[in-house]
Amino acid sequence: MSSVTFTDIQAAHQRIAAHIHQTPILESSLLNKWLGGHRILFKAECLQKIGAFKIRGALNMLLKAQENGTLSTKVVASSSGNHAQAVAYAANLLGVQATIYSAQTISSVKAAATRYYGAELVLSTTRKEADEQVKLAAQAADTLWVPPFNHPDIMAGQGTVVLEALQQVGHVDGVFAPVGGGGLIAGSVICLKHLYPQCEVVGVEPLLGNDAAQSRRNGSIHALTEAPVTLADGAATLAVGEHTFPFIQQLHHISEVTERDIAYWTQWLQHVLKIHVEPTCAMSMAGVCQWLQTKTTPQTILVVLSGGNIDQAKMLKVWQDNYLDSLPSLLI
């Protein structure tokens, strides 16, 4: 099995730099104060092209294939949303046809954007069916399958998020990012092992979809039987990949977050940062609070805000209860 190195991530960053935004680092002095004087820095990939970090992996894989002369005239992918948009955008940029397979539960905003970027969107009853369909489609001639996470070129592209962030902010004590299939968190581990090996990398996932945490505890990949129903739809994968799992095993910890905490932090991050963030990345703050309770000295933390695409239905669920009357603290 091929692996991914820090050099691969550096090469990916150089490869995709002209096609992406260098997203900003955000900070809230009020939130820092409420959480005990620690510094929490937010890498705002919600302001990235297509509204999510996923564009980095898709672009890296397709641009690298183009460099190597192996880019097909058709690409296929399966996705719950942000990867769908990313592949559609990248394929359109490079002038190739894209077909995306997804479950009918895909966010309406993400579905519309995927079609807007020129891709054909094929909907199935379940995510499992969509994953099966893409495997069949990938067997067609002159077709390239672009996985959402379980490929070295995708992982290297996703790793550029933290590489870029560390170039912007320097040393940090902890890095927090959501865990879906594991591409983003794997890339984060690779960067930190090379640049700041003492930094702790923590993955965060919904308790209702905790396949990564179960896999890490069991020492082998555990697959869910059906897609979890969670506000954090970007982390609603059935299982991590054989390429990403070895890096997930190297994490300091995986924090498993309740739906209440996911809604709470989505509301509060939108309020204090004044930006649109998805529940999938907002949930990382619950992990941050758990982690900070174990620290006795001031910490500097990097939180990856992986996306900002939310449709009306999801927004209504997030705001079903008002949590802004309860100020953030390490006990939340």
Image: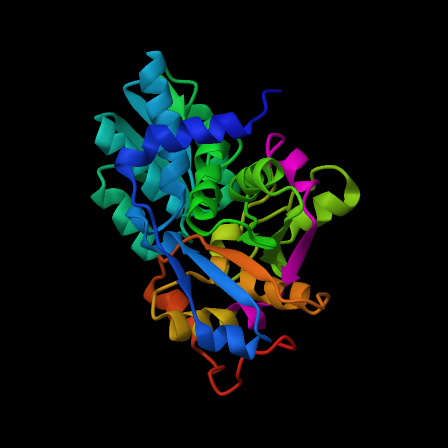
Please indicate, yes or no, whether residue 13 appears anywhere in the rendered image: yes
Q: Is residue 10 left or right of residue 24?
A: right
Q: Quadrant of residue 86?
A: top left
Where 83 sits versus 141, above or below?
below
Q: For the C terminus, which image quadrant? A: bottom right
The residue shown at (28%, 30%) is: 91
Location of residue 95 in the rendering, given as x and y in whole percent from the top left corner: 21, 26
Q: Which residue of the protein is positioned furthest toward the right in this rendering?
A: 218
327 and 115: which is toward the camera: 327
Please indicate, yes or no, whether residue 152 appears anywhere in the rendered image: no
78 and 9: which is toward the camera: 9
Where 195 sits versus 107, above or below?
above
Location of residue 225 in the rendering, given as x and y in whole percent from the top left corner: 63, 46
Q: Which residue of the protein is positioned furthest toward the bottom in this rendering?
A: 325
Where 175 sits versus 323, above or below?
above
The residue shown at (37%, 21%) is: 64
* Number of marks in the rendered image: 0
Location of residue 113 in the rendering, given as x and y in whole percent from the top left corner: 26, 48
The residue shown at (29%, 31%) is: 98
Q: Is residue 98 left or right of residue 150?
A: left
Q: Quadrant of residue 287?
A: bottom right
Q: For the N terminus, which image quadrant? A: top right
Q: Is residue 50 left or right of residue 81?
A: left
Does the magenta segment cover residue 263?
A: no
The residue shown at (41%, 35%) is: 57
Which color scheme did the rendering employ for the protein? rainbow
Does the magenta segment cover residue 256?
A: yes
96 and 250: which is toward the camera: 250
Where 104 sits versus 195, above or below?
below
Location of residue 191 in the rendering, given as x and y in whole percent from the top left corner: 55, 38
**Magenta residues, as a range?**
241-262
